[in-house]
Image (spheres, grey):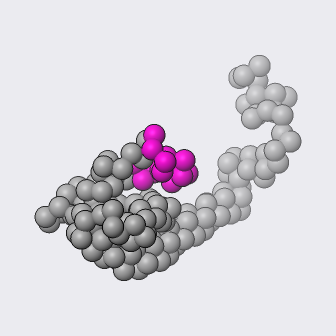
């Protein structure tokens, strides 16, 4: 999912020090830096990003809120861009969260289906999965079996 950051807010974020500045303590700062580095310019000065998590969108929203709180320190364009971002961010955050949840559920379902198919098909993988499902197994292959003899 692509999200467009208004130009003045994009410029403000570009000038913000997400590596060593005050915002660098936020756990989302590294992901935000990577997202902004991978972004492309849109029309005008806008920046088109593809966030991997809602935390990136929330960090950008925090910058936008700070602009609105301290309006006297910012240009009219920055204030307008911050307002525009906050109007869009709610929809973008909700949509991204739904997309991530759906993808995670599809991956979980696929893993369960493969595991079930292997276990019921009687393949060696199915037997191995059932035999080594616990974390207490000391070795990848039991050394008293034929496969383990290769590693002895």
Examine the rendered structure and indicate whether residue 148 appears above or below residue 82.
Answer: above
Looking at the image, residue 105 sits to the left or right of residue 21; the answer is right
Q: Tell me the residue at 13%/64% (across/down).
A: 44
Q: Split into 4 quadrants, where in the image is the C terminus? A: top right
Nearer to us in this view, 58 or 112: 58
Q: Tell me the residue at 43%/70% (across/down).
A: 69
Give yes or no for residue 32 being in the magenta stretch: yes
Question: Chief secondary structure of the magenta span?
Answer: helix
Looking at the image, residue 105 sits to the left or right of residue 129; the answer is left
Q: Where is residue 31 in the image (x, y as percent from the top left)?
A: 45, 51
Q: Position of residue 34 (x, y in %)?
A: 39, 48
Examine the rendered structure and indicate whether residue 137 appears above or below residue 120.
Answer: above
Instruction: Give the extent of the magenta segment.
Output: 20-34
Q: Tell me the residue at 25%/56% (across/down).
A: 11
Can you see residue 131? no
Q: Where is residue 114 in the image (x, y as percent from the top left)?
A: 61, 60
Examine the rendered structure and indicate whether residue 86 appears above or below residue 35.
Answer: below
């Amino acid at each position: 999912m692509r999200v467009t950051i208004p130009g003045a807010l994009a410029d403000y974020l570009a000038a913000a020090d997400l590596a060593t500045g005050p915002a660098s303590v936020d756990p989302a700062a590294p992901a935000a830096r990577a997202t902004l580095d991978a972004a492309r310019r849109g029309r005008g000065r806008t920046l088109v990003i593809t966030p991997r998590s809602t935390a990136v969108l929330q960090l950008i929203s925090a910058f936008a809120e700070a602009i609105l709180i301290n309006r006297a320190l910012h240009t009219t364009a920055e204030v307008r861009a911050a307002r525009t971002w906050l109007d869009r961010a709610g929809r973008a955050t909700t949509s991204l969260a739904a997309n991530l949840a759906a993808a995670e559920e599809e991956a979980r379902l696929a893993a369960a289906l493969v595991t079930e198919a292997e276990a019921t098909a009687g393949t060696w993988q199915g037997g191995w999965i059932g035999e080594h499902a616990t974390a207490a197994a000391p070795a990848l292959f039991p050394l008293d079996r034929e496969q383990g003899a290769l590693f002895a």
